[in-house]
Image: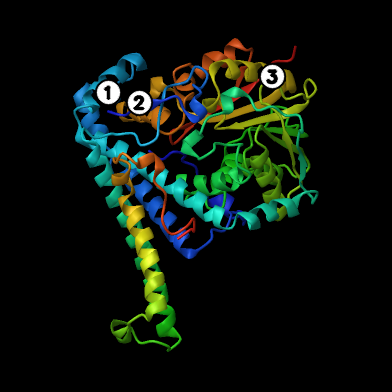
Amino acid sequence: MPLMQVDTRQALGRNNVAVLPRLASREDESYLDYVESLRSFVLDGMRFDQQLATRTGHLEDTSEPPEERLKKVREAAAEMPVAQARDRLMRSQQEMKWRRICSSLDARRDIHLERLKAAEGRGPARLELDPDFEQPQYANVHFHLQPDGYYKDPLAGFRYHYGTKVFFVGDNDKDQLHASLVENHLPLPADGRVERILDLACSVGQSTTALKQRFPAADVTGIDHSEPMLRCAHHRAVELGVDVRFSQRLVENTGFEDNRFDIVFSFILFHEIPMRIIRQTLAEVRRVLRPGGMFAVYDFMMAREMTPAQLYHRYFDSRNNGEPYGDDFCYAGFDSLLREFGYQQAAPGKRLGTTQAWYATLPAS
Amino acid sequence: MNNRHSAGPSGQTPEGGAPLAGNNPVYFKDPVQDAMMNMILELSAQLWVCVDRLYALEDLLARQGIVAAASLDGYKPDAERAAALKIRRERFTHDILRDLKSLTEGAAAATEPGGGGAG
């Protein structure tokens, strides 16, 4: 099953143009094309779902608690050479990817830094950085094995952008996954009013600009803790000529006034923050989302719905691909967390590949 | 999985998170197998880069009528070009064999040859 399964035809028809950083040489691009193919091969060609399901006695039956199923899955996988080979290849393709992306960007570091500097102060996109911003301890992780993580290297945004291009194995080269998510999988608030939108943890702003393109009259703000990500997002939006605002803020403490937003959009954020911050963020969104507004969350599917192979991959990925909080999220039961914080279902959730969409709203007080 | 774990960047344990595999995790019973697999993957990648470049080059040369495919077989580099190729070859070798180096005692102090270029 693909990581995110959406119909991108309509979004591609919008002729959106991604602003991927150019690498230093065709050699580097060829190398990363190969890594992309290697990743495709591992994802599609090294599946052992049936073998694992047969050995554990589980295929579609997900009635047993996921923690119990995971124990059996890990025991079975420990005896399967294919599991070890897949682990090795998954890890290796990530390491190869980052080595080449970083060395290639570093070879033209001055040029990339100059591009970011040249975008400063240019519109129509706006950039707000907080000179007193303190990075939270929980964010000090090399997510997805990205060297130096999200905020320590000035080129972290460019690294991330090219890294995710390879991650999505060609399906997001023109940001079409982000565009499709926003175009086809984002329901409106019941009253249809969309004046202000918040994109939580926007990284390089791919969904932020897609939101503005769908809602041209709305005020769209993307927030993130990482200055390099925000600088890259701003540069990208300037190049695209999209009028959005990027602001350095914490998702759990945004500083916006109560009831400000009609839509709060969250794409693959919650599995990258610890449970304490998940809870604070749900409380913060409850404060800044207006009654009747739409809280759209797209993230990892829940463990209880995973097949044996998916449980195995989640366990591997959390530990070997820099996703330390992934298990917390997947085993938590996000539906019950939403209910605990007073959210109601605004529309039935959707499965998009192994990504799950939740649509929540707040009742009028 | 037979992988070693470390606390993550800067030796800090992420808040309440799963233990993260450190550098050079081992997945096979014998770490040499891990190194062998990485060598094969690196070799495959380098070979693809080469195939891709050759394809583009020969296509351009032939379409512009500069070099016939057959004349490539007679090519011999001069001293300067041979030296440049040697540097690239050493870098190529290092990239493919890097994982064997990680098994040696001097792994931490090992430096990469050929400068920090992107090739």
Residue type at mark 2? Answer: Leu
Residue B119 image-quadrant placement: bottom left
Residue type at mark 3? Answer: Glu
Tell me the number on the disc at residue A284.
Answer: 3
Nearest to the observer: residue A201 or residue B39:
B39
Tell me the number on the disc at residue A73.
Answer: 1
**Vertical position of residue A201 compared to residue A102: above or below:** above
Instruction: Give the class, few, some or many, for how many residues have Cα within 10 Å of label 3's Cα (few <14, many ≥20).
Output: some
**Vertical position of residue A198 compared to residue A160: above or below:** above
Residue type at mark 1? Answer: Val
Q: Which residue sits at x=23%, y=26%?
A: A78
Nearest to the observer: residue A321 or residue A259:
A321
3 or 2: tag closer to the N-terminus: 3
Tell me the number on the disc at residue A144.
Answer: none
Nearest to the observer: residue A200 or residue B104:
B104
Does residue A347 appear anywhere in the picture?
no
Chain letter belonging to callout 3: A
SS under mark 2:
helix
> If the image is split into quadrants, where does the N terminus of chain B sit?
top left
- Residue A340: horizontal and vertical position, in percent? 59, 10
Q: Which residue is mark 2?
A: A311
